[in-house]
Image: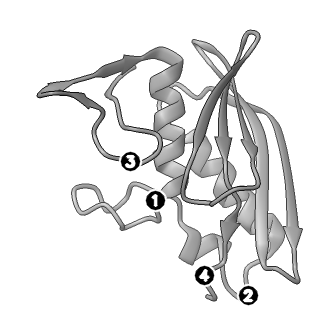
């Protein structure tokens, strides 16, 4: 898989002067997971089917925890080159209305781990841990819906 690199802090195109960067393999899959879980379905005008169905399947009074987990797993598996989810842990804080996920997924490029961190939910940090490529994700707030 190839993709145009995005700056992990700003989400803008990663550029050096007028040159774009292309990323491949695990880095591209990591970036696609970041985008897929960051965007709500319908947010991107060029592909209104891309994103995660937070309003439809994750948030709301009538949504069950099992339905939310299933929607997130489906969204993860829709990312190109993700063959399976090998570990999926989740937690829900009813008082703070925060649903948090931590998972590993298998790709042709190795195992990719997505784990929550405690900072601002809109920024993502990338780290490498031995043979595991790690994408550190944030909690997903309910936005009051």
Nearer-the-camera pick, 65 or 43? 43
Where is residue 24? Give x, y as percent.
40, 16
Which label's residue is closer to the chain start, 3 or 2?
A: 3
**Which mark identifies residue 62?**
2
Residue wearing tag 3: 11
Q: Secondary structure at mark 3?
A: loop
Residue wearing tag 4: 143
Residue wearing tag 1: 39
Viewport quadrant of the N terminus: top left
* Residues at discs 4 and 1 in contact (Cβ within 8 Å): no
Q: CA distance from mark 1 to mark 3?
A: 12 Å
Q: Residue at x 63, y 88 (%)?
A: 144
- Disc 1 crowd, CA 10 A, few/some/many (<14, 14-19, 20+): some
Q: Nearer the viewer, mark 4 or mark 1?
A: 4
Q: CA distance from mark 4 to mark 1?
A: 14 Å
- Disc 2 crowd, CA 10 A, few/some/many (<14, 14-19, 20+): few
Q: CA distance from mark 2 to mark 1?
A: 22 Å
Determine whether 9 is above or below 130 in the image: below
Q: Secondary structure at mark 4?
A: loop
């Amino acid at each position: 898989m190839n993709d145009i690199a995005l700056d992990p802090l700003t989400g803008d195109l990663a550029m050096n002067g007028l040159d774009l960067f292309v990323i491949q393999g695990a880095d591209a899959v990591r970036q696609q997971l970041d985008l897929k879980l960051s965007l709500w379905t319908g947010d991107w005008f060029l592909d209104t089917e891309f994103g995660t169905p937070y309003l439809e399947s994750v948030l709301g009074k009538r949504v069950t925890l099992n339905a939310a987990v299933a929607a997130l797993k489906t969204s993860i598996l829709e990312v190109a080159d993700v063959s399976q989810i090998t570990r999926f842990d989740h937690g829900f804080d009813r008082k703070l209305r925060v649903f948090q996920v931590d998972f590993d997924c298998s790709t042709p490029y190795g195992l990719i781990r997505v784990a929550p961190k405690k900072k601002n939910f809109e920024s993502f940090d990338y780290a490498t841990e031995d043979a595991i490529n790690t994408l550190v994700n944030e909690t997903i707030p309910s936005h009051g819906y």
